[in-house]
Amino acid sequence: MPEAISLSDRFYTEGEYPCPVCRHGRITAMPLMEVFACHFCQHIFTTNFEKQLLKMADSQLPLTWYWNGKNWKGIQRESAELGWSYAISAIAFIILPTAIIGLGSYLFPPLPDSPLSWLPLFWTILTFIAHLFCLLWLIIEYYQLPIFLYFRAIRRRLVGN
C-alpha cells in the first residue's frame, strides 16, 4: 500500500524528477505534449497524476513506477513474474552448451603437438562467453537498460565534451 504523500512531495507537471530507467537523467514535461521525457536516455513516459504513476510509453513492456515523494518505486507487472524456472533455464542455457563442447574436447583431445591444440579450450571458453552475452542481452532488452548511453556519458566525461 502506498504511503501518504504531502502536497509538497507530489508528482506534478511542472516538476523535474530523476529518471527511473537510467537513474542518471532527469525527466521533465515535454512542451506542447502531455508526456514526460528523459533528457539522458530519451525514453518517453505517460503520467497519471491522481495515482502518482509514471508509465514508459516507448516500450513493449508495461513498465510502471510509483512516486513516493522522494524517488520512484517499481510496480510489479501483471503476468510477468520472473520465477525459478527462468533462472534454471538461464543457467542451463549457459552451462549445457559449454559442457557439451568441453566434454567433447575432453573425450576426443587433439594431438598435443598439433598446431591447433589450443582450439578446443578456446572454443569452450568462446561458447560460454557467447551464451552469457546472449543472456545478458536479453536481460538488458527486457529491462530497457540504456547501456550504450552510459558508455556515451562516460566517454563525454573522460574527453570533456
Image: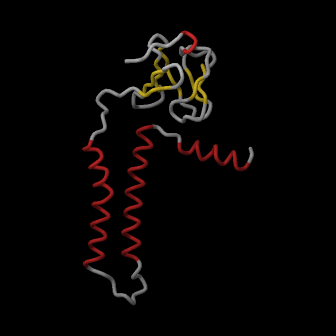
Q: Quadrant of residue 92?
A: bottom left
Q: Where is residue 8 in the image (x, y as percent from the top left)?
A: 58, 12
**Where is 83 relative to 122, above or below?**
above
Q: Residue at x 25, y 44 (%)?
A: 85
Residue 100, given in percent of the width and then of the height, sits at 27, 67
Q: The C terminus is located in which quarter? A: top right
Please name whichever residue, 70 or 54, is drawn nearer the observer in this view of the structure.
70
Image height check: is 1 above or below 83?
A: above
Q: Quadrant of the N terminus?
A: top left
- The residue lying at 41 percent from left, 72 percent from top is 122
Give the image location of residue 84, x and y in percent.
Answer: 26, 43
Mark count: 0
Front-most of residues 35 and 52:
52
Q: Is residue 100 above or below residue 81?
A: below
Q: How is the image coloured?
A: secondary structure
Q: In this view, does 147 lie above or below 29?
A: below
Q: Residue drawn 52% across and 11% down?
A: 6
Q: Which residue is drawn at 41% across and 82% down?
A: 116
Q: Which residue ends up furthest to the right in the rendered image?
A: 160
- Say whether residue 159 is left or right of residue 15: right
Q: x, y (%) of residue 81?
A: 30, 34
